[in-house]
Image (spheres, rainbow, N blue to C red):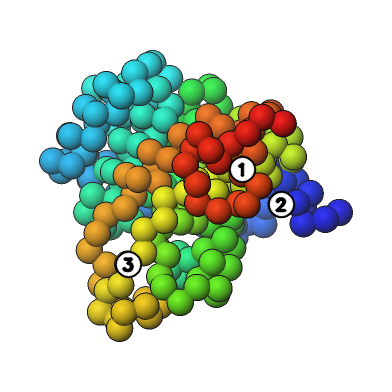
Amino acid sequence: MNVEEQVGSFIVETRWDGLPKAVRNQARLCMVDDLGAALSGTLTRASRITGAYAAETWPGDEATILLRGRRAGVVGAAFANAWAANAFDSDDGLRYAYGHGGAQIFPTALAAAESRGLDGGRMLVAMVVGYEVAHRVGRCWHDSRQVYQACGSWGSVACAATAAHLMGLTPEQAWGAGRVAAAERALPTLRAGRPSGALRQPGDRCAPRWHGVPLGRSGWGLELPQPGLEPGEDGGEVPLAGGLRAR
């Protein structure tokens, strides 16, 4: 089994009963923590603005915008709830990825699971998949770059994996979804308290909020992992229209 097959199979075939007890417990803790961050964030002006924007931009009745009395398409709900989850910067951080994972992964899992009528167990497994992909992709990217890559650079790939699991894609489709998300990801770089070009170190402060961008782009993770779509030949950062081609 090659790497593509291994990753794709992990994304779509991971099951709750196959996870170690410690991982299952941690998944529950992450979900409660992410939900708490999102609910408290709904008190902010940013959440009110993005909630209204999401309902108008991605209209629908697929998923809930938390505590707004609104519903939206699955992408809109994920977008709005992600803004809420990071509004107070109280959401979790991933040590190996140098950034926030839950504020991206949880809203994607919640919206995708609700839109498909899936239970909390399925949502938790999708979050485990998303966190695992986030840690690994984030660490790989930072090991090969000298400039800190903000959360959207790996968050979009994690969201694509999360959604692919809940959508019941094949391993090949799941791998393709990750490639699309990687090619079209949000790619902000931050330099905070470090010399220009230096990798951010633990303890540095990062004020900008980037979660709205990758979660808007998480729509690509939720909508694009379909047969016939794949990233451009060069795999670089290219516009959406040019970065996808029919097989």
Residue at the far right in the pictured view = 1
Q: Is residue 141 toward the left or the right of residue 59 in the image?
A: right
Image marks 2 and 3: residues in contact by CB distance under 8 Å: no
| Residue 231, numbered label | 1
Residue density around tag 2, few if under 14, some if 14–19, many if 20 or more, within 10 Å:
some
Q: Can you identify the residue that label 2 sits on? A: 7
Mark 1 vs mark 2, foreground winner is: 1
Q: Position of residue 59 (x, y in %)?
A: 34, 18
Kind of residue at disc 3: Leu
Mark 1 vs mark 3, foreground winner is: 1
Indicate the quadrant where residue 11 lies.
top right
Q: Secondary structure at mark 2?
A: helix
Q: Earlier in the sequence, mark 1 or mark 2?
A: 2
Kind of residue at disc 1: Pro
Residue ID at (39%, 61%): 150
Residue 182 can be seen, yes or no:
no
Residue ID at (72%, 31%): 247
| Residue 190, numbered label | 3
Q: Earlier in the sequence, mark 1 or mark 3?
A: 3
